[in-house]
Each structure stands twice: as C-alpha cells, then as structure tokens.
Amino acid sequence: MARLTDPVTILKGVGPTKAKQFAALNIDTLEDLICHFPRGYEDRTRMVEIAQLEVDKPACFKAVVMNHPRTSHIRKGLDITRVQVADHSARLNLVFFNQKFTTEQLQYGSEYIFYGTLTGDYMGYNMVSPSFESPESTPITTRRVLPIYPLTAGLSNASVLKAVQQALMLCDPPAEILPPEVLEKYDILPASDAYYAIHAPKTMEEAEKARKRLIFEEFFVFSAGLALMRASRAQKKTPAYENLNLQPFYSSLPFTLTGAQDRAIREIAADLGRGTPMNRLVQGDVGSGKTMVAAAAAYLAIQNGHQAALMAPTEILAEQHYASLSKLLTPLGISVCLLTGSMTVKQKREIRQAIEENQVKLVIGTHALLSESTVFADLGLVIADEQHRFGVGQRSALSAKGQDPHLLVMSATPIPRTLALLLYGDLEVSILDELPPGREPVDTFLVTESYRARINAFIRKQVAEGHQCYVVCPAVEDGEELNLKAAETWAETLQQRVFPDLRIALLHGQMKGAQKEQVMAQFAAHQADVLVATTVIEVGVDVPNATLMVIEDADRFGLSQLHQLRGRVGRGGAKSFCILISQNKNPDTNARLKALCKTTDGFKIAEEDLALRGPGDFFGSRQSGLPVFRVASLNCDLATLKLAQAASVEWIEKMGTADTPESQALRHRIADLFQRSQGTMN
C-alpha cells in the first residue's frame, strides 16, 4: 500500500518529464494529486440515436464508420480529416482538425461510441472533433460523468485522470477530519466516499454531493484554524492597562466624536484592560474617522508606560498621520516622531536612537519601522493602517519588536460581514458606520462620452474657484486594451489640446516609489491643478482641496473600487463631485453604476458588489487577503461557508484540545492550508 506522502513518480507512466509537468500544478505527492479536484464535469451518460442529436447539446451515440477516413492538407499547420458514420436512424459527417491519427483509429465497418456537439443548420449538420472509443474500451471516456481537470502545458485531461485513478487505487484518501455529529447534522458525505466520488462520480448529483463535502471541509478547516488562533491568543497573558482615563484626550479634541468612534474606542479600552493581547480591526468607510480611534488607542498605551507604532503603506500617508497626530498629542505631553525610508542616514540614526532610548512614545512610519536597526524600548501597541496593504508577515515582524504587543488594524475598504468573517475571523471587529458631522456626501453622476465638452468646462470651473481635480484612467499606456483611456496619453492630450493653461500631473503604478511619492506630495501642495492617474490613488494622498473626480471607462472598475476612488474627494469643506464616464450599453452594468450614484454608504455598495461580482473579484484581480482554496469557490459557495463557520465554532467550543483521530487530522490540515496561503492571507 502506497502512502499519501509518496511522490507521483511511483505511478506507472509518470517519469521525470511528467513529474515536472505535474509540479507546475503544485502536484508533487499522491495527496496533492488526489486533492487536485476537477474544475467541472461533462455528463456523457446521455445516449441517443443520431436522429435525436440536437444542435449545441453534447451527447453520446453509437455508430458504424461508413467509409475510410480521408485527410486533406489545406495549408501549413492545417489538416482536415473527414469521415461519415451512421446508425439505423441517420448518417452524420464528422470533421477532425489536425488529428490525422483518426485515419488509423477509425476502422471502416467498425462500431464506436462518440461524444460531441452537433453543429449546423438546415443546410447541413456535422460534428467537429468528437471523442470516441470502441464499446470494449477501458477505462471508458464516454457513457460516464467525465471530470475535467485544471491542466498545464504537456498534460492532457486523460493523463491526469489516469494518474488520479491510479493514486486512489494505491492508497487511502486523506483522513476524515469532520466528526460524526457534523457529518450527520449537515448531511455531509464521509471523506472515504467523497474523495472517490469527486473523481469518478456515477451521476452529476453524486459529483455535486462530493463537491459540497469538500467545499464544506475546506471552509471548516479554515474557520477552525482561525478559531484556534484566537484561542491561542486568549491564552497569552499581558499586563492589563490600569489607567483607562480618556478624559484629557477627549478634552483636547477640537470636535465631538461620532457615536461609532466612541463605541470603537470603548471596545478598544475594554480589550486593553483585559490582560490578553488585543487583536482588533477597525473597519470604516472613507472619512469615518479611523485615525482618531487609533490616536485614542495610542494615548492609552502611552499613558500606561508603553510605546506605540503606526505603520502606513506610503510615505505621504505616514507624513499626513504625523502632521495630524503630533498636532493633537504633543500638547498632551506625548512625543511623536516620523521614520521613513527617504530620510537621510543621519536623520534615521538619530530617530532610531531616540526610539531605543524611550525618548519617543509614538512612532509613525512606513516599512522602515520593520528594519532590524529599528529597536523599541517597550512597544505596547502596533497600529497597521490600510490593513489589506500589509501581509501577515509584515504585521508579525512589527509585533515581534515588542513582548506580545496589542494589535490594531485599520481598513477603509468596507467589507460585507460574510467576507469579513473569512478575512478577519481571527480578529475582533469594530465598525465605524457614521461620518463626522459637516462632511457632505459626494454627488455622483453617470454620463456618456457625449458630455465631454461639459465635463471639461466643469473641470475648468473647479480650478478657477481654486480647487483641484482627479482624472482616473483604467490603463497606464496605449495598447494595454483597445478603446480604453490610457493615463499617459490622456494626460498629454489634456495638457496640449484641452487645458494648455492648467498644470496637469501624471501618476501611475509603473512609476518608481520615490517618483510616485513626489507627484502625490506636489499635488497635495497644490503644485498641480489636475492629476491624471490610475487606481494607484485609491489609497493614499489626502487632498482636502480636491473637489472633483472624473473616472474614465468607469464600467471597468468594481463598485467598491469606484467608491474608494470617490473617497479621495469631499475631504474639505467645499461641495465635491464624482463623474463616472461609460460607453457601456449593457443594462446590468449601467444598473450597477447607477447604484453608486444613489448611495454613499460603502457597506451597502460592498454588499451590492459582492452580489454582482463575487468575492473572488472583490478586491480586483490582484487582491490579497483571501486564502488559497483547492475546490471552494468564494463566488458561489457563501451559503456553505456560513454553515461550515457555525459548525467549526461549535466543534472547537465542544472539543477544545481533545486528542481524537479527527482532531489530529484537522490540526494537520489547518497547518497545510495556512502554509499554502502564506503571502496571500492577511
């Protein structure tokens, strides 16, 4: 009997070359192969007569070859083989492209079973490149539900299927991790049945039951992993903060906090007084006042004798935090410093010395905080701004500079509750769902290209009133995709042909970091009137003077991303506007964009975006933060996710640290999932 940890090379027909091809799919062992699940199925169980074949409906039929296959060489790289087959009901012409081998495999007068899709109309019907085999063939590829696997260059579906079937014959599938009561309560197939059924289902219903089991299993493992992480943190001890008096902090504020801010601060204070390390996410819409909540947390840490560190994703954001927080906290006797990569060696050395000697209580910076030469005297609180921009490794590296410091992460991306549970299941969540008084909502309009002259006039009007504008493009340069506005070309057009008298700046993600920082800083200092940019501005610069955002080809962005972009304006006292330009005629797309015009509630927009596009696309194509699942699809399995989360919480609470075979297997699987997800999960 083989073991799951054995390499795939023990399989017949898998030599070094094929092993390399499997490795390209992250398949090295028999377990990897058995866990390489089909991406879909072809139901080849439907057998019909030729006369019953329907256009565009795949089916199987049995027929006799009526002539010798003939191959015609059309041109270089194109051969066409034609053959006619028949049963008692009708005849049918088959066409094969670049499959000359069919002339030898299809014997005149012999009977075969074919699987394919009929094409054509009343002028004539045929079938292009159907699968076929003799009725005695084993293993069969027709008259069955055929799994279709993710492939790579050199690997055919047949070769993967053959290898998987061998692996299942040689060793037992992965061990059962779901307890009997969970299997019964949620009507879940046992592992021993599910792993066989997903690779060789007898019916589509059986395939669906197996898939449901494995989706449930993955979500259960992930949710249990988060629950165990939370439980292990709860066992850690840290001195409870005794001084939780925030009255001096509140008295120094030039404004009144919102009810949501007050609630979040009270939740943080309770965490800090508990005697275990805080792990809390403050999630709020753009402009909801997360920075003041972070300032209150830092104030409490410092009043209890510790240092606090706030890490921002860009230098300009770090500088803005430094400007606002030092103005707020310095009068309270709290020393604040800024540490960024662009500082001189001497500046960095002096600041790091002050941090190490405990002369500075609040340190604000970028990744420079993570360097080995940054040593804290007593780091008690870590604050990570724009959480989804920092991976778990970076947060851990900063936390490692203290003795189990408290952790506060902030996100301006509103995330629906189901997805928040998935992404931040190991964190407590505070939601800021109110905007500070005085902030006017941004008026949003959806228009077509026919409004271009009016838009240009409106840009000129805003600039004449002393304000600034953003123009966002979906592409960086021409040629990325046809008919899309490209930032580089559009900036040039605006400067030379439309607004020669205005100062136009350009910003995109392909620029070097220092160059980006410089452009953003210049725009913030009102050294440019119009900033033409890609979505690189989605997180970052705070320019209260910017009152207008024009988004070109708005249909190319997700709703949540459009909402984030819109949040760049409306940060000052002046009335602000967002204009979405789209030529897309699709009614669903227009309905989606109109939804953005109707509301400025980021959480409502996020729910709408999730329903329309699914979480796989929620953060854009290069989003980070979602775990790596083998079979579960976040786009369509959210109902199963909720069930699995409930089941895992029940199980962890009931079993705790029980040492059953299922719990041992579960811990092994948790470690495996979190290892595979490293670098993508936050």
Image (cartoon, rainbow, N blue to C red):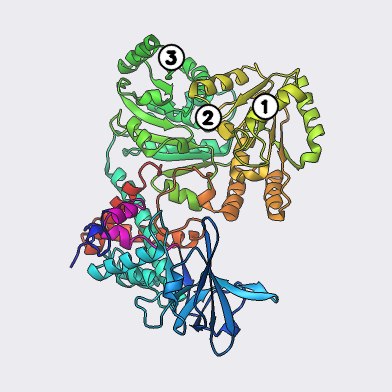
Report the mark closest to the observer, 2 or 3: 2
Of the image marks 1 and 3, the number of the one nearer the N terminus: 3
Observer-nearest of 466 and 550:
550
Residue 334: in sight, yes or no? Answer: no
Three-letter amino acid code at disc 1? Ala
Three-letter amino acid code at disc 2? Gln
Disc 1 vs disc 3: Cβ atoms closer than 8 Å? no
Q: Which residue is mark 2?
A: 510
Of the image marks 2 and 3, the number of the one nearer the N terminus: 3
Q: Which residues are magenta?
A: 17-39
Crowdedness near tag 2: few (<14), some (14–19) or many (≥20) residues, C-alpha within 10 Å: few
Residue 571 within the segment the image draws in magenta: no
Check the image and report above or below for 521 versus 164: above
Q: Which residue is mark 1?
A: 491
The residue shown at (54%, 44%) is: 620
Q: Position of residue 191 (x, y in %)?
A: 31, 68
In the rendered structure, find residue 343 and report the number of the disc placed on it.
3
